[in-house]
Amino acid sequence: MKCITLIKSSAGVLCLLLSLSSVAAETIKVGVLHSLSGTMAISETTLKDTVLMMIEEQNKNGGLLGKKLEAVVVDPASNWPLFAEKTRELLTKEKVDVIFGCWTSVSRKSVLPVIEELNGLLFYPVQYEGEESSKNVFYTGASPNQQAIPAVDYFMNEIGVERWVLAGTDYVYPRTTNKILEAYLLANGVAKTDIMINYTPFGHSDWQGIVADVKKFGSTGKKTGVVSTINGDANVPFYKELGNQGISAEDIPVVAFSVGEEELSGLDTKPLVGHLAAWNYFQSVESAENEAFIKQWKKFIKDKKRVTNDPMEATYIGFKMWAKAVEKAGTTDVDTVEQAMIGITTPNLTGGVAVMNKNHHLSKPVLIGEIQDDGQIATVWETNGTVMGDAWSNFLTSSKDLISDWTAPISCGNYNTKTAKCSGQNF
Amino acid sequence: MMSTCEGPKGPSAAGTRAKYIKIQRGDAVIILIRQLATVFLLLLVCAEAYPNVSTKDDLHAISQQLGSVKLRALPPVVAQLENSGEAALPLLEALLNGGLFTRKSDKRVLIGLRQGDGRYLFSDAITAEILPQVSKSQMKKIVINNRLRGQIRDIIAKVTLTSVETNIRTRAIKNMFNKMTGENILLLRQAREAETEVALITLIDLALAVYDLTNATAKQTRLESLDLMAVSLEPLVFNTLAALLALDPEGNPLETDPEVRAKAQKIYTSMEEEIRFYERLEQFFYGLSLGSVLLLIATGLAITFGVMGVINMAHGELIMIGAYTTYVVQLLMPNNLEYSILVAIPMAFLMSGFVGILIQCSVIRFLHGRPLETLLATFGISLILQQAVRSIFSPLNRQIISPSWLSGSLEINAVFSLTYNRLFILIFALLVFACLQLILKKTSLGLHVRAVSQNRGMAKAMGIRTEWVDAMTFGLGSGIAGIAGVALSQLTNVGPNLGQAYLIDSFMVVVFGGVGNLWGTLVGSFTLGVANKFLEPVTGAVLANIIVLVSIILFIQKRPRGLFPQKGRAAE
């Protein structure tokens, strides 16, 4: 892997030298920081291609500020410390103006100190656990109140779930999300004995015992639902086991936050039909923008069967917003663009308009969908209007007084409304 | 069928009575007779015409509505289908299975059946006329949600309670377990009269007993119900008893009759014990099943590492190649998906074995006796293989269709069932192990392998072509890894990282069982599997893994050669 990385990066440097000699300083550089090898390659490669597609389109339309955009693609190889190194490389050596990248929360946490030290700009396109706000990061994915909380509301009000299984992979996103959800459920009068929390390691494949436990937990006569923060790969054996043990979506529905169209395209969807997913975007949503986007994507990737998913829409929105902000600011200077970003709007692919808020999070609609046998997700419920992303959850005692506001006079990522103080730490 | 015909009768009969009071007696009789005649005629018409014309028209109208209304408005439309009885079944089933479409152009409702090649064959929802020229791009699927699915299943249950097929009736009765309404109980009582199958009579009696226990007032009936319930392990029975024995907020029992309570308590306790027993049994099976997966992935390694002494870091990738072979075989025979896995087993063996021999002949052969360099070289090979698969098949996971005979579970009783795929893999793993033992013990290749592994120099002196034997042994070990890949493709993702996840597990099993001893691998894998599954409910999956790993480390400190160390000079 190292060897390949070396070849890739040296090829990148070579290209760079060539391009420098011909069109020196005539381009705006866009860094793309997504894993192209290792465990996360399966999800992140798609986002790299999405950014490249957006850049191609922008260049076709004349670029930005009269300059062409130029992608600088690096491969952090699903290796969390390498994410920090690659960020440093992008900012100091390549001197990129903006970075689109990261997928897992742990990779973002690894990038944060570097991007703040060197004052870069990162667009993070994946749903995450919240409890963070950095001046240098724009979060275009969903925070828990834009995905997890509405999904739980749907279960509670529309399906009438009374017993809850919170199942997740053992790392920071599921742990934090489940902490928020547990607090939320307790606040809504659910008894502690009616909540079962279960964590499994990454890539867990032997679900027999856990599914049997869920089945037992759900056989008391009260309606039971599973809220799954199980990470990508482990989902396939999980759903297979559910199907084999005869648990259908009507008996015990599962709502997942990490299962999208792309994950579904790699598996036999028969046992999954009727289970749910909560996102801000589904490929099946019918709108003119979405149709055009899907068409563009299939043409760019030269594969008619490729699907689109929520992080792709988040990347799309992030890129469009950044381009607008640069045009508005008339420069790519990080501080100016950062201020110009706030209040920028761009149409969602699912209809309506996304707004970038003062806390660097988006206002977006939330959709709940049921998985169909063709691997698509059909919307069964959506919020009225948009939901504003919340950086600090109101359901955790440690963060309920905190807000994030990056405009003057507060200009702070974690401002305590009670003590009127900004904690020194930025994220 | 009945409710539609009852419709006109009800109001007119009431009307008759109202008029009877107002009008003079003499006229009244005539009017009464006339009215009765109308009702009679109406009933006749209804009974005659109903199944032929109006059902089809009704169905057509309802299906048209299905295609045009929004998801939220669907439930009342679907509810109308109940009146059409069995005639509505194809429509209901298609809707339930996501096979009902509307044509975009004229809103005609069609049933689409997915063919083996992924294309759809459409037929009219009402007349079943096949329309071969219609393609899926002209159609829009009618989307339903879980609530509707439940509603449809309830309707199907009501309609099929008197079906001729036993398993459909069974499903219908089981479905009614979830909804013990007065209407359903009435239907069940009717079905009980007509039922001939003893097992199903017991099932219906059980449902009726549960209903009687909670709703009847006569003590005798309730005690009899309890007698019926005593033999069952259904969660429904267990929950009903638990609810019956519950205490109210002041701590007084909800059930006032002491005799009923005592009897229920007795049944509840014995049931609890029985359920716990089956839970243990189930856990043990889960352990065996995990053990069988470990056995499959470790057997190949037991040969290359245990017998040949080669530390093969690419073992996981050989498993992965087996899994991808399953995928390719599936692509090659799209019309026989059910049996493609049977073809995949020998193909995967050959494919992985071939790659294994290639690795042995091109790399490992030159590094003989230099374990550290072998380790590094094979690690490099594993990365090359992973990236190769990424380049050929893309980094995305590939979809393996599980054949229907490997899906679902074997229900032994209401609380104990074994999933077919796990059961087959358990049997398969033991079969592979037995075959391997046979090869090593009974064939000349086995003899040569054992001779070379015990004393290479002496074997060479006896005229054994050690290089050839090495290649064959490595090929055999790799081939078995490929077979493990086929099994894993039924359980987990098929992607470039498949092998990595299982490499450590397989080394763990071989070292724990004792290097060079196949029986050690067998015992080791089942021990680890069962230990893991018994720890899991107590500690959680993450901690269970850690505890198992730490125990193995401690065990190896105490017995460095594993459970069954090789003895004699060969071990030196």
Image (cartoon, coloured by chain):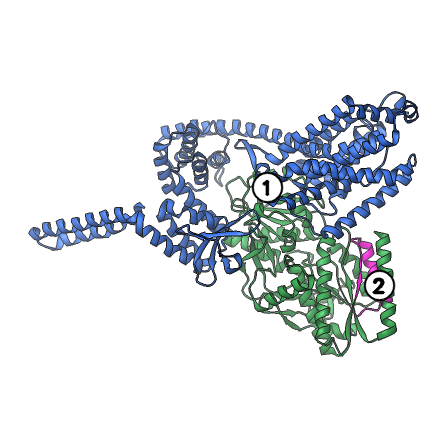
Chain colours: A green, B blue
Relative to the observer, which residue lies in front, A342 or A30? A30
Calculate the distance from the C-alpha at mark 2 to the C-alpha at mark 1.
Answer: 47 Å
Q: Residue furthest top?
A: B568
Identity of the amino acid at label 1? Asn
Instruction: Using the image, name the chain to which the residue with label 2 belongs.
Output: A
Q: Which residue is mark 2?
A: A12
Q: Horizontal and vertical percent for residue B62?
A: 38, 55
Q: Do the dots labelled 2 and 1 sit on one chain? A: no
Of tags 2 and 1, the one toward the viewer is 1
Q: Residue furthest left?
A: B26
Asked whether A85 falls inside the magenta stretch, the response is yes
Q: Which residue is mark 1?
A: B336
Q: Which residues are magenta?
A: A71-97
How many labels, in total?
A: 2
Instruction: Using the image, name the chain to which the residue with label 1 belongs.
Output: B
Q: Horizontal and vertical percent for residue B124?
A: 43, 53
Relative to the observer, which residue lies in front, B570 or B438? B438
Q: Horizontal and vertical percent for residue A91?
A: 83, 66
The reply to whether residue B275 is in sight is yes
Identity of the amino acid at label 2? Gly
Q: Secondary structure at mark 1?
A: helix
Query: 10 Å neighbourhood of mark 2: few (<14), some, or many (≥20)?
Result: some
